[in-house]
Image (spheres, coloured by chain):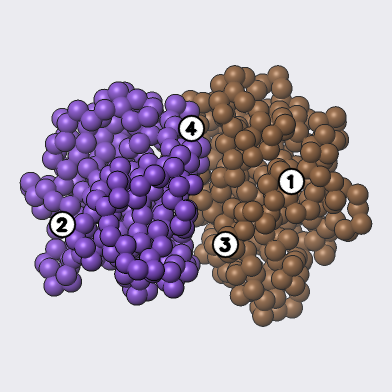
Chain colours: A purple, B brown
């Protein structure tokens, strides 16, 4: 989940199609900092028979699962990104059966049957860029660690067979910049939007910020406040909690790089 | 579609539950001006087997079909409006078979089977209130006619078996107030949001503004410009164009009155 990519690095300026081509031919690395300016996406692919539940879950929980695109049944190319192949264009996948990860391959061609529908949800990388542009420091980037994520006690709205508790990502923000972080991220509803919670982690059921459920702990600077955003990992939590028979997702941090300009999903 | 309801009229101040009770017991009249301050909604109810196509169509065409709520399969009560009964709480319905209206009853209990899913889409009444609040005149209201609606040549994004051309509503707006009309309606994405087109009706394929496809022609005042908004009737156009085997909708103007406060669907 690192976005600490010195702008000089070659992958920061790679056009998305060239980035995808690298992953397609075997490169397997987190995508933070790749193809700056383009939206990256969470992938959740399910059999058609589960597609309505997924789309309704996303509609009912838009902060966790902001829909960027949906493939046609059996297609591996999202309409927004012609030429892409969701079966091979991500650096690493998770294959889920009955709510458990059974494989983490770099290619899911062998399991992408003709009844699969792929959903792409917005990713925090986009609003993190907006925070940086607004002068808000990202502690996890400064410290070179993954952003910490936590399961909360906040129930998502269930949809059909899908249910989950909300997963949040947390960033320590200087108290004097919390308002800026709120307004800057709020402009990106396609990328989780404004925070869901500021301070008081105990109300989310988080006992210890130093023990995240995913990602790494991050160190607070004096005067930092814990700010929590809805997280796309919630969709994987739903697959797990609901023991859905089959799903394909990305490995956290190993996102799909779309052709969608971040500027185009900014609220106007 | 009249919203010309002198504020003194009793129905303007009726709580939504009482308005629904009147329709439930047989009152059949357009709902414009009823229960001011509460969102009214377009209804499209389809068999579960078509629900994914409808939700995907709405996701791909959010200006025409902004989703306010979705019922559980077989339920007639939208989660946002406890106690409501979508089978009897609207003043008049259309029952569609193979893309054609076969009935316009005031009660659809007999056809609401246990596999029906009801979708509620936002309605222009909400942003019209915002226009009035912003001092923008509504010519169709001044003239006591229904708002004119037109089929356009703009294709909606298809979804599964559903396809349609966009239907728009048109309001003549004084040239000096077009910008105000844009910004005031833009704050209500759950109610079609900002206009899709200003001026130049010929580019929409509209040959004669005096001959709307639905509703009534409206007279322009000197200096008025034609402003076009996406219209919820698009969902009925999709049922028609796609010859979907079965659907239930409201009769245009005879909306479902929700318990959702208009203030709660205003963008913040």
The nearer-to-camera label among 1 and 2 is 2
Chain to which the residue tagged by mark 4 belongs: A
Report the front residue among B70 and B217: B70
Position of residue B219 relative to residue B93, above or below, is below
Q: Residue at x 69, y 34 (%)?
A: B82
Check disc 2 and report its element: helix, strand or loop: helix
Q: Residues within 10 Å of mark 2 (few under 14, many from 20)?
A: many
Report the front residue among B228 and B222: B228
Check disc 3 and report its element: helix, strand or loop: loop
Spot occupied by residue A105 in the image (x, y as percentages of width and height): 14, 36
Chain to which the residue tagged by mark 1 belongs: B
Instruction: Determine if marks 3 and 1 fall on one subunit.
Output: yes
Q: Residue at x 13, y 40 (%)?
A: A106
Position of residue B174 relative to residue A27, above or below, is below
Q: Which residue is mark 1?
A: B253
Q: Is residue A55 left or right of residue B239?
A: left
Q: Which residue is mark 4?
A: A159
- What is the CA distance from the residue labelled 3 to the residue labelled 1? 28 Å
Spot occupied by residue B236 in the image (x, y as percentages of width and height): 60, 40
Chain to which the residue tagged by mark 2 belongs: A
Tag 2–tag 3 contact (CB < 8 Å): no
Q: Residue at x 80, y 49 (%)?
A: B35
Tell me the tag on residue A19: 2
- What is the CA distance from the residue labelled 1 to the residue labelled 2? 50 Å
Q: Which residue is mark 3?
A: B268
Check disc 1 and report its element: helix, strand or loop: loop
- What is the CA distance from the residue labelled 3 to the residue labelled 4? 26 Å
- What is the CA distance from the residue labelled 2 to the residue labelled 3? 36 Å
Position of residue A245 relative to residue B136, above or below, is above
Please say whether residue A166 is visible from this viewpoint. no
């Amino acid at each position: 989940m690192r976005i600490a990519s010195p702008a000089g690095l070659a992958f920061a300026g790679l056009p998305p199609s060239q980035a995808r081509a690298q992953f397609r031919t075997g490169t397997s690395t987190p995508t933070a900092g790749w193809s700056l300016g383009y939206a990256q996406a969470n992938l959740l692919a399910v059999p058609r028979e589960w597609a309505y539940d997924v789309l309704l879950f996303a509609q009912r929980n838009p902060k966790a699962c902001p829909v960027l695109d949906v493939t046609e049944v059996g297609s591996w190319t999202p309409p927004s990104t012609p030429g892409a192949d969701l079966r091979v264009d991500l650096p690493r996948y998770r294959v889920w059966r009955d709510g458990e990860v059974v494989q983490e391959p770099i290619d899911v061609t062998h399991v992408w049957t003709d009844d699969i529908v792929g959903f792409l949800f917005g990713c925090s990388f986009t609003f993190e860029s907006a925070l940086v542009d607004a002068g808000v420091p990202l502690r996890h980037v400064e410290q070179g660690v993954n952003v910490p994520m936590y399961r909360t006690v906040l129930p998502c709205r269930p949809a059909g067979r899908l249910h989950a508790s909300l997963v949040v990502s947390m960033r320590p923000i200087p108290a004097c910049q919390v308002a800026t972080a709120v307004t800057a991220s709020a402009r990106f509803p396609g990328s989780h939007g404004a925070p869901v919670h500021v301070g008081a982690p105990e109300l989310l059921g988080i006992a210890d910020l130093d023990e995240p459920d995913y990602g790494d702990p991050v160190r607070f600077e004096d005067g930092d406040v814990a700010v929590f955003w809805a997280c796309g990992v919630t969709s994987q939590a739903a697959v797990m909690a609901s023991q859905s028979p089959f799903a394909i997702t990305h490995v956290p941090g190993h996102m799909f790089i779309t052709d969608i300009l971040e500027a185009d999903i900014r609220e106007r």
